[in-house]
């Protein structure tokens, strides 16, 4: 990209040196100086095909886990929660059956 120096009216071109965009004239005028923006490495999510960062462990669009170790941990958590629910359900069913049996026993005793 070329530009004209407002100080000496010379035409200049931008250049990048050591990752820094240089825009200065031979007369010493500096237009601006900034780091060049390098695009971050991306890939497509295998579940929803949206673009995500290459280092992503979870898709920000669909929420699917991409890291196999995290997926295993999440699966273990889900199984443990289901186990607790079923155990609680079984205890509740047993208590209900015992209460019904006591009511029937008391009803026939009277």
Image: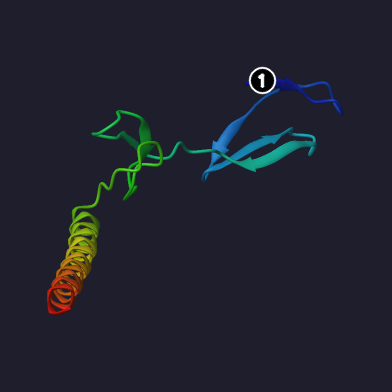
* Left or right of 5 in this view: 22: left
| Rendered position, 102 above or below 57 | below
Hey, which quadrant is residue 10 in on the image? Answer: top right
The residue lying toward the viewer, choosing from 2 and 96, is: 96
The residue lying toward the viewer, choosing from 70 and 1, is: 70
List the residue tagged with mark 1.
2
The residue lying toward the viewer, choosing from 40 and 106, is: 106
The answer to whether residue 11 is visible is: no
The residue lying toward the viewer, choosing from 31 and 76, is: 76
Query: What secondary structure is found at the residue carrying circle 1?
Result: strand
Residue drawn at x 68%, y 41% as measured from the top left: 33
Residue drawn at x 15%, y 71% as measured from the top left: 104
Residue 74 position in % (x across, y down): 24, 58
| Rendered position, 6 above or below 42 | above
The answer to whether residue 57 is visible is: yes
Residue 80 position in % (x across, y down): 20, 66
Residue 81 position in % (x across, y down): 24, 63
Residue drawn at x 17%, y 63% as measured from the top left: 86
* Left or right of 14 in this view: 61: left
């Amino acid at each position: 990209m070329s530009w004209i120096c407002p100080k000496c009216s010379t035409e200049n071109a931008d250049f990048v040196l050591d990752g820094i965009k240089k825009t200065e004239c031979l007369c010493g005028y500096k237009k601006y100086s900034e780091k060049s923006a390098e695009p971050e490495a991306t890939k497509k999510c295998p579940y929803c095909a949206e673009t995500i960062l290459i280092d992503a462990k979870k898709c920000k669009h669909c929420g699917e886990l991409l890291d196999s170790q995290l997926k295993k941990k999440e699966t273990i958590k889900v199984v443990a929660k289901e186990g607790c629910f079923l155990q609680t359900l079984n205890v509740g069913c047993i208590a209900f059956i015992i209460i019904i049996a006591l009511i029937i026993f008391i009803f026939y005793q009277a």
